[in-house]
Image (cartoon, rainbow, N blue to C red):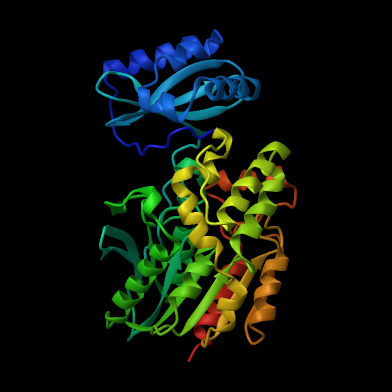
């Protein structure tokens, strides 16, 4: 994945000037003329991405993707147009942003995914909107409730994993297309358990006046606490359970102290600080990228940011998210879970290629009275998947693939056993 300048985009028709720009880009790219593309840059983009780095990036793109065969318009919202870019070797989203002088102010490539297929919720369930107001905007979500209930019922707050993951478990920018959280809400509802899933700050339909560089890990915790308080005021619910997936596990753990929560569920949560997990994950990248990430990480540990980042690392370490990384890396999940005073369920897939079983075992060691369940065949997106890495990752873009049944069974059994 190559990230150069990320800009949100959504809408319907591209103005003529964008058509001209994308056609020029295609022509110059296929003719191996990176300097001509560079001349399309605005002064700001030229400053943030000098010619030598742009030329190196273009060379890398051509080596990986081959020629650009065609560009099909997908959507537009000022100032960004999104195209389905079909290369010889792969299909990507190509996002182009222009200023008033028709100069490029942003280019953003990410893997193409088919539009997420609609998952029909069970007819026995109702869905209604939820909105949490924050100091900088609002967090929208979906409350799923069984239609036929007798008395109060439990409600689960589902906290999404890392990256730009929305309430349903999908992330356009990262090629994530799973519907995992929506499926989970559906299964919980069929078992008489309500749930709330929501878009993280700066993701999906959430609204924020803050910039990416101002985001901190505790902002996610504040949002979770706000939603817990909102659910606590709703007289339909008998108890609140917090479920955090991946990064959301730590968010959930930090949100439960002094809150009216009766149980906590960690799904694919890390058992050590995130910098160690991400460093391990980076080993799957080319060595030169892993080394550059380590250099950036060493600087963060010293309280220093790294502005000069290889464009290939923008997806994980661009300058604007380094403050967030620093705020995230300082937490040790094992220490946090040890302080939990409520029943805890730790769920982990045996075929998770992002978070290994050893992480769940670290959480269990720190919280000896927690229940640990290792689910055979389950991967990081909660689906049945082979151990082979490529085939495993392929399930991240199979929205119709059902959840691993043992996941639902374990969660429902835990919730119904709470006092």
Q: Compared to 397, does 124 lie above or below?
A: below
Q: Position of residue 385 (x, y in %)?
A: 68, 53
Q: Tell me the quarter of the image containing the N terminus.
A: top right
Residue under the point 57% across and 56% down: 302
Q: Place residue 159 in its image quadrant.
A: bottom left
Q: Is residue 149 left or right of residue 109?
A: left
Residue under the point 61% across and 58% down: 275
Q: Position of residue 130 (x, y in %)?
A: 28, 64
* Residue occupying the far bottom of the picture: 419
Q: Is residue 175 visible?
A: no
Q: Position of residue 165 (x, y in %)?
A: 46, 52
Residue under the point 48% across and 37% down: 114
Q: Is residue 166 left or right of residue 330?
A: left
- Front residue of 196 and 218: 218
How many numbered tags mark residues here? 0
Residue under the point 32% across and 81% down: 232
Q: Is residue 39 left or right of residue 101?
A: right
Q: Is residue 191 left or right of residue 124?
A: right
Q: Compared to 393, does 234 lie above or below?
A: below
Q: Is residue 48 visible?
A: yes
Q: Compared to 219, does 325 lie above or below?
A: above
Q: Position of residue 339 (x, y in %)?
A: 55, 84
Q: Place residue 153 in its image quadrant.
A: bottom left
Q: Compared to 238, does 72 lie above or below?
A: above
């Amino acid at each position: 994945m190559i990230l150069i300048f990320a800009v949100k985009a959504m809408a319907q028709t591209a103005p003529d000037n964008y058509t001209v720009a994308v056609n020029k880009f295609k022509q110059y790219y296929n003719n191996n003329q990176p300097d001509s593309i560079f001349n399309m840059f605005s002064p700001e983009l030229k400053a943030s991405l000098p010619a030598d780095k742009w030329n190196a990036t273009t060379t890398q793109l051509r080596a990986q993707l081959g020629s650009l065969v065609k560009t099909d318009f997908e959507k537009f919202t000022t100032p960004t147009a999104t195209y389905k870019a079909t290369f010889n070797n792969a299909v990507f989203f190509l996002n182009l942003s222009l200023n008033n002088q028709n100069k490029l102010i942003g280019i953003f490539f990410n893997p193409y995914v088919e539009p997420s297929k609609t998952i029909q919720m069970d007819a026995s369930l109702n869905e209604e909107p939820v909105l949490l107001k924050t100091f900088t905007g609002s967090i929208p979500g979906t409350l799923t409730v069984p239609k036929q209930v007798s008395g109060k019922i439990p409600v689960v707050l589902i906290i999404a994993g890392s990256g730009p993951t929305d309430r349903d478990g999908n992330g356009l920018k990262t090629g994530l297309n799973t519907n995992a959280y929506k499926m989970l809400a559906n299964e919980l509802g069929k078992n008489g358990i309500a749930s709330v899933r929501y878009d993280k700050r700066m993701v999906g339909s959430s609204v924020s006046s803050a910039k990416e560089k101002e985001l901190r890990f505790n902002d996610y915790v504040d949002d979770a606490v706000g939603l817990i308080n909102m659910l606590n005021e709703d007289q339909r619910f008998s108890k609140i359970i917090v479920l955090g997936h991946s990064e959301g596990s730590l968010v959930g753990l930090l949100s439960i102290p002094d809150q009216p929560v009766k149980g906590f569920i960690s799904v694919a949560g890390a058992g050590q600080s995130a910098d160690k997990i991400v460093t391990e994950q980076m080993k799957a990248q080319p060595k030169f990228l892993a080394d550059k990430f380590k250099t950036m990480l060493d600087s963060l540990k010293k309280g220093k940011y790294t502005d000069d980042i290889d464009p290939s690392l923008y997806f994980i370490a661009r300058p604007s998210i380094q403050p967030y990384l620093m705020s995230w890396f300082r937490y040790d999940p094992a220490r946090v879970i040890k302080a939990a005073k409520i029943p805890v369920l730790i769920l982990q897939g045996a075929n998770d290629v992002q978070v290994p079983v050893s992480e769940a075992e670290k959480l269990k060691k720190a919280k000896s009275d927690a229940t640990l369940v290792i689910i055979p065949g389950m991967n990081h997106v909660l689906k049945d998947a082979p151990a082979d890495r490529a085939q495993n990752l392929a399930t991240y873009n199979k929205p119709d693939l059902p959840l691993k049944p043992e996941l639902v069974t374990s969660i429902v059994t835990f919730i119904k056993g709470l006092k």
